[in-house]
Amino acid sequence: MCIEHKKEDIMKLVPLGDRVVIKQLVAEETTKSGIVLPGQAKEKPQQAEVIAVGPGGVIDGKEVTMQVKPGDKIIYSKYAGTEVKLEDEEYIIVKQGDILAVIE
Amino acid sequence: MCIEHKKEDIMKLVPLGDRVVIKQLVAEETTKSGIVLPGQAKEKPQQAEVIAVGPGGVIDGKEVTMQVKPGDKIIYSKYAGTEVKLEDEEYIIVKQGDILAVIE
Amino acid sequence: MCIEHKKEDIMKLVPLGDRVVIKQLVAEETTKSGIVLPGQAKEKPQQAEVIAVGPGGVIDGKEVTMQVKPGDKIIYSKYAGTEVKLEDEEYIIVKQGDILAVIE
Amino acid sequence: MCIEHKKEDIMKLVPLGDRVVIKQLVAEETTKSGIVLPGQAKEKPQQAEVIAVGPGGVIDGKEVTMQVKPGDKIIYSKYAGTEVKLEDEEYIIVKQGDILAVIE
Amino acid sequence: MCIEHKKEDIMKLVPLGDRVVIKQLVAEETTKSGIVLPGQAKEKPQQAEVIAVGPGGVIDGKEVTMQVKPGDKIIYSKYAGTEVKLEDEEYIIVKQGDILAVIE
Amino acid sequence: MCIEHKKEDIMKLVPLGDRVVIKQLVAEETTKSGIVLPGQAKEKPQQAEVIAVGPGGVIDGKEVTMQVKPGDKIIYSKYAGTEVKLEDEEYIIVKQGDILAVIE
Amino acid sequence: MCIEHKKEDIMKLVPLGDRVVIKQLVAEETTKSGIVLPGQAKEKPQQAEVIAVGPGGVIDGKEVTMQVKPGDKIIYSKYAGTEVKLEDEEYIIVKQGDILAVIE
């Protein structure tokens, strides 16, 4: 539907507060005939990569220290987050509290 | 139904507390024949420009420091905010906590 | 149904705590034939004038300072407030937190 | 069904905490023929008279100072309060926070 | 269905925290023929007698001082409390915050 | 359905925080013919015996001191708690705040 | 559908904050004929083994100290937690507050 392209002058999402921009990891599956099927049609995986991390600080009257960093692979809470689309890329913005675990 | 006009003596929305007046960014789309289609008919984009920012301070017993400024392009939470119309211009008033990220 | 009249000895609403008495601004519309149509039949405008302001103070364990004053034109949250009728005048009593912005 | 009578030794409601005993004011209406119609059949008025006021103090961990006194005419929140009947008189017990304004 | 009997060695309900054991007052009604009708068939009265009072103290992180004592006649909130049966007697255990007023 | 047996090496439930392991008391009823009917078929009694008590401490940011001890007979809140089965014995794990009263 | 395999370079779930990675214990049942039936078809057991424990710390503005450790057998709250699948193994990530008791 849209041709992916990276512009020279790329837009960047800078999350506020304790928010984290993540990108869902697509579990690719290769059929015997070699066709790669992206994972979207299957049960939505909850694995994602951290793209950008908010500064933390006092959020809703409570001090929040950010525990994740860009590049981390994480598991996040299924019904959490807001999907956003920026330059044909889909991201999810979650609160750090919706990140359940880091995959090491 | 109404002719848009900017009065000399323009009205201004001054948000209270941690509220932010934003204006939805309309993703224009140009068809092959050159007709510009405003984005409203499509899925509502969640990008907006910050128009005015409240003073922050103690909101609901919690100190809030404003992190955005007029002119910022932001992503905001889909179901948040109140739509208001002032002199034929449509604005949305959100709490800063409903702003997910700044686009840089 | 009732003839509006201002009594000499007018009743006054003195709001408690962080409450604010407001009066909805009726967007009048003049048809070509000169008939003035009050705005009630249309989408309810959320503009109001502040009539009386509570003293603020510690509300629900949190210090609230009042930011609006009688005469201010304000935008308030659509589903907020309680409509009250006093001597054939209709008012709305809102909490200050339901006032989104002042119109200047 | 019951004959109203005031006993010598009248019972008294002493509200606890930040509660206030109020008595709904019945807006009487006199028809042209002079018949007085009590307001109950119409939209329930939200005006009431304060009968008794609790001591205030620390309620739910928060200091509450009572702002109303017996005899005050008040506007209260429509869906608030508990109706109680004592010696054939009907009262409403509300929390002070459900009193919106005093009528002066 | 059961014959009421008071044992020598009676069981006692000792409420925890800010709870209060109350016993609903049955508004007896004497018909003209002298038959006493207990109030249960009618609208449930909200009057009760205090039977036992918890020690109060820090409940849910908040200091609660008990304001009622055994023997007090009280009005309690209609939908509050848990009905318990002990030795064929029915009690209601409410939190003190559900007691609206004392009847004096 | 299962033959009750106590193993030498019995498993033990050690509740966390302000939780309490209780065991519902079955109100036995003896019919005239001497048949003992366990209470399960009737309205579920809310009486239970305390089996094990958590250490208390800071729970959800609030200091909780445990007020009950193993062996106490208690009344607990009807819809509270989680039923667990351990070695064919059924227990209920409740928070201490769901224990309404101790029966003495 | 998938052949279980343990890779040399195994992935590890590192829970954030007060979260705990657990693995449901499957209550095996051996029929008379010796066939082992895994417990899944029956009522879901709430017993699990602790696999990994978050660092605790200030969670939602409240200090949380972790009380469980890897290897603990625990009872957890039925409707709590998020099921995650990592390398064909199913885990549940719960908050420590959803762990009711340790089985000793």
Image (spheres, coloured by chain):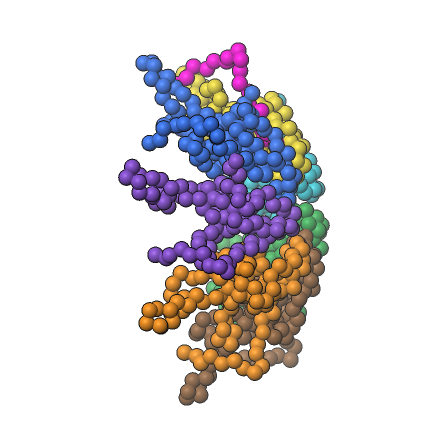
Chain colours: A purple, B orange, C brown, D green, E cyan, F yellow, G blue
Whether F101 is drawn above or below D8: the answer is: above
Residue G57 visible in the shown view: yes
Name the magenta segment's main secondary structure.
loop
Name the residue nearer the viewer: A94 or A32.
Answer: A32
Residue F94 visible in the shown view: no
Q: Residue at x 65, y 61 (%)?
A: B56
Q: Residue at x 63, y 62 (%)?
A: B17
Quarter where residue F76 is shown? top right
Task: List x then y, in percent, for residue E100.
Answer: 62, 48
Task: List x then y, in percent, for residue D11.
Answer: 65, 50
Question: Within the magenta stretch, is there residue F9?
Answer: yes
Q: Residue at x 50, y 12 (%)?
A: F7
Q: Which residue, as the protein is rendered here, is positioned at the far left?
A: A33
Marker count (numbered)? 0
Q: Residue at x 54, y 24 (%)?
A: G71
Question: Within the magenta stretch, is there residue C28?
Answer: no
Name the residue nearer the viewer: C38 or D17.
Answer: C38
Whether A43 is drawn above or below D90: the answer is: above
Q: Which residue, as the protein is rendered here, is positioned at the far top?
A: F8
Task: List x then y, in percent, for residue D96.
Answer: 64, 56
Q: Is residue D48 left or right of residue A21?
A: right
Location of the C terminus of chain D (image quadrant): bottom right
Q: Is residue C71 left or right of residue B91?
A: right
Residue stretch in magenta:
F1-21
Task: List x then y, in percent, for residue F43.
Answer: 45, 31
Name the residue nearer the viewer: G30 or D100.
Answer: G30
